[in-house]
Amino acid sequence: MAVNMKIDLVGPARRGLATGLNEAAGYASLGATALLTGYLATTHGLRPLLFTEHGLGLAARLIKGLYPLRGFGQIPTGHLADRIGRKPLIVTGMFVQSAGFVLALVLLYRPLPAGTASAVLLGLGTAMVYPALIASVSDNAHPAWRANALGTYRFWRDLGYAGALVAGVLADALGLNATVVAAAALTAASGLLAARLIRGGTAH
């Protein structure tokens, strides 16, 4: 409802910026939480932490905290979505995220640069995608049912967190590398679908 309220207040020309500000507030806090959970995970010897497995200690916790700091990036990317349209940011952002997964494995022989570059790309890609997707849903929903449309979108988007359970099962069965490859492939496939289905900010 906070998102819906902001979107109604600013109108279609500023929806990207409004949603960027909203998402930034939440994910900046998530960044601090990620640092704490990373500390607890490495302190208590928990798995499946890819970079910890490759010899990083404190640095692994810092890497974990980089990705959620994408929250700050959602302010300029949300504004950019208002200027150039939703589709370029959605499609490009998905591919940037996929590249972040790939880079984590390609540079794994140097875990600190690999983790840092991967976290930055994943954060940048997500910052590009999140405000643009919310704004796109809003663009295509009549005001009378916009709140319902946004609620439905957020339900399915946030259900993606259940993917962590799937990733855990996959990591146990096939290893961490296979899990990262699967995440990269699914994210790239999402970008291809977005490129095909979105036309000028309107989904068909």
Image: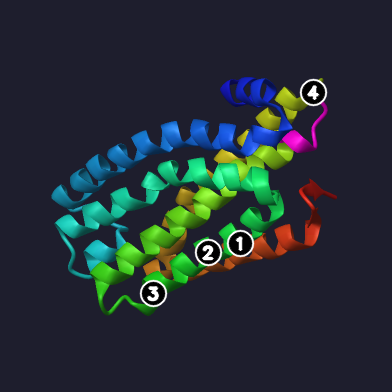
* For residue 147, above or below residue 120: above
Q: Nearer the viewer, residue 135 or 151?
A: 135
Q: Residues within 10 Å of mark 2 (few under 14, many from 20)?
A: many
> Upstream in the sequence, badge 1 or badge 4?
1
Residue 143: which disc?
4
Identified at 72% across, 58% down, the residue is 194
Q: Amino acid at mark 4?
A: Pro
Q: CA distance from mark 1 to mark 2?
A: 6 Å
* 19 falls in the magenta region: no
Residue under circle 3? 105
The reply to whether the magenta stretch includes residue 141 is: yes
Q: Secondary structure at mark 3?
A: helix
Disc 2 target residue: 96
The reply to whether discs 1 and 2 touch (Cβ–Cβ < 8 Å) is: yes
Tell me the distance, in whole angstroms, between the alpha carbons under discs 1 and 3: 21 Å
Question: Of marks 1 and 3, which one's residue comes earlier in the chain?
Answer: 1
Q: Residues within 10 Å of mark 1 (few under 14, many from 20)?
A: some
Tell me whether circle 3 and circle 2 mark residues in contact (CB < 8 Å): no
Q: Nearer the viewer, residue 59 or 16?
A: 16
Q: Residue at x 38, y 59 (%)?
A: 120
User: How many residues crowd around disc 3 within 10 Å: few (fewer than 14), some, or many (20 or more)?
Assistant: many
Q: CA distance from mark 1 to mark 4?
A: 28 Å
As drawn, 203 above or below 187: above
SS state under label 1 = helix
Quadrant hosting residue 112: bottom left
Q: Are marks 4 and 2 in contact (CB under 8 Å)?
A: no
Instruction: Please give the residue where the numbered disc 1 appears in the rendered image.
Output: 92
Give the residue type that dot 3 points to.
Leu
Q: Nearer the viewer, mark 4 or mark 3?
A: 4
